[in-house]
Amino acid sequence: MRAICLIVITVMFLGVLPAAAQDELRQWASWASATSEYTTTDYSAMQATGEPDTEECGDAVTAWASSTINSTEALTVGFETAVIPTEINIYQTYNPGAIIRVELLPEDGSDPIVLSDSADPGTDCPGVFSLTITDEVSTLVNGVVIYLDQSQIEDWNEIDAVELVGIPVYGVDAEGSASSEQASYDGPSGLSVSCDDGTSFDNGVEVRVIQMRAGYTYTATAIGLNGFDPVLAVLDSSGRGLCTDDDPNAASYSAYLPTTGEVAPSSTSSQVYFANNSNNAFEDVSLVVGGFGNTTGEFVLMLEGMALTTADGSGDPFSLQVTPGMLASGVSPSVYMISVVGQMDPLIALIDQDYNFVQVGDKGEYVACDNAGYSDCWGESYELSNYYVPRSDGRALAGGSYDAMLQIGLSNAEPWNFFTFLMRSSQMQTFGDYVVAFHIGIG
């Protein structure tokens, strides 16, 4: 039976709302480029990323060096999280004294901000040239350009690391804690939703789109695997919205993903076509999927209509709440970001409350994926060129070698906590429409 009706959510949704961050964030450069470099490996621009790893003053392959001496050069470094800057620290490990100017790169792509009095007055070797941002800078920045005139020293001025210190404007809580009501609740294995037509479920899983832009239309679709019958609810921040079961518009939808295999079309698939008509410019929107009659199984949840633009700051955050049912399913949740336009290079990262990429292990690996199936993708992933997700009007969106996927294990997860994913592009240099797909289990 198809149902599209107003719903009331009966289990409290936990807020994961943007909030002004008061604490300074310290971060090392995550990418770099230069007007020249001595080689593409040793002495390359990328040697200036990450924490300092050149301990002594001297000519070292672990720092950036230009291709020649007596030259005018520029080293550009980028950072994962845009901040209101308060300080820049430049670690120099050979012949300091050539830096003539430092500029900040705004996140929105506007003109660089030239810092006054930013020439190096003389730094010890090894030493740190520190710039306190006394200029009135209220723009979010995520890049720094360091200009050098090495004719002043007639030798190489080598740079080992660059640190940006500043205040992030927004944060997303990836470690969200449950209210006491939820933490002690031992009935449903997930969130409870009641539709006006009497359809209900108590094992719902929530995917929340953080601060979805108003004035646009979107299509959310849930397809069950192996006979699972999903019911889909789309809710605003007050917990009210639409729910649907067995939508004929979704009956032709099929998918093929590495973690699901072939997902056949089903008359029990659910779909909601909706507009975010909030009076606010942005509002959280929750997509909740449960089993009809509280049945268990696996599903793919897709969201069409998303777009990454220069106005999106660091990217588009999505949060996935861990439920007891998810843990019982034994299915590691997977998220896919597939570009609709060829020029876009998607990237997915697990982030903390300060929009920092989460790092794990002794080597501090980022839980992120740029190109699925390649070495720059964390965990188990697969190149997506042979896979696809459905789109409206019977279309299929093929994956590409630049598309991203991220699979998260649940062995250390706690019920009612959140995983928060940031959907963006590699180095935030490409933009366009994309489709998000989640593969999730309910036990």
Image (cartoon, helix red, strand yellow):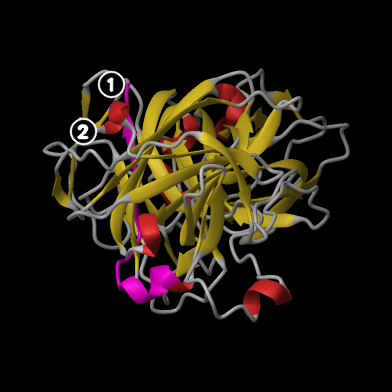
Segment colored magenta:
325-340
Residue at 38% x, 60% y: name it: 293
**Is residue 247 shown left or right of residue 349?**
left
Q: Which residue is mark 1?
A: 342
Question: Measured from the top left, where is residue 264 in percent x and y?
Answer: 14, 42
Foreground residue among 197 and 286: 197
Number of numbered tags placed on the structure image: 2
Residue type highlighted by circle 1: Gly
Q: Is residue 92 left or right of residue 349?
A: right
Q: Report the quarter where the N terminus lies.
A: top left
Please provide percent x and percent y for residue 374: 22, 50
Please tell me whether residue 288 is drawn above or below residue 316 in the rendered image: below
Q: Which residue is mark 2?
A: 400
Q: Are marks 2 and 1 in contact (CB under 8 Å)?
A: yes
Q: Pointer 1: residues within 10 angstroms few (<14), some, or many (20+)? A: few
Tell me which label, 2 or 1, sits earlier in the chain. Answer: 1
Q: Residue at x 40, y 48 (%)?
A: 231
Q: Element under label 1? A: loop
Give the x, y percent position of residue 365: 41, 64
The answer to whether residue 329 shows anywhere in this view is: yes
Q: Per the image, is 333 magenta?
A: yes
For the point 26% across and 36% down, the residue is 402
Q: Which quadrant holds residue 36? A: top left
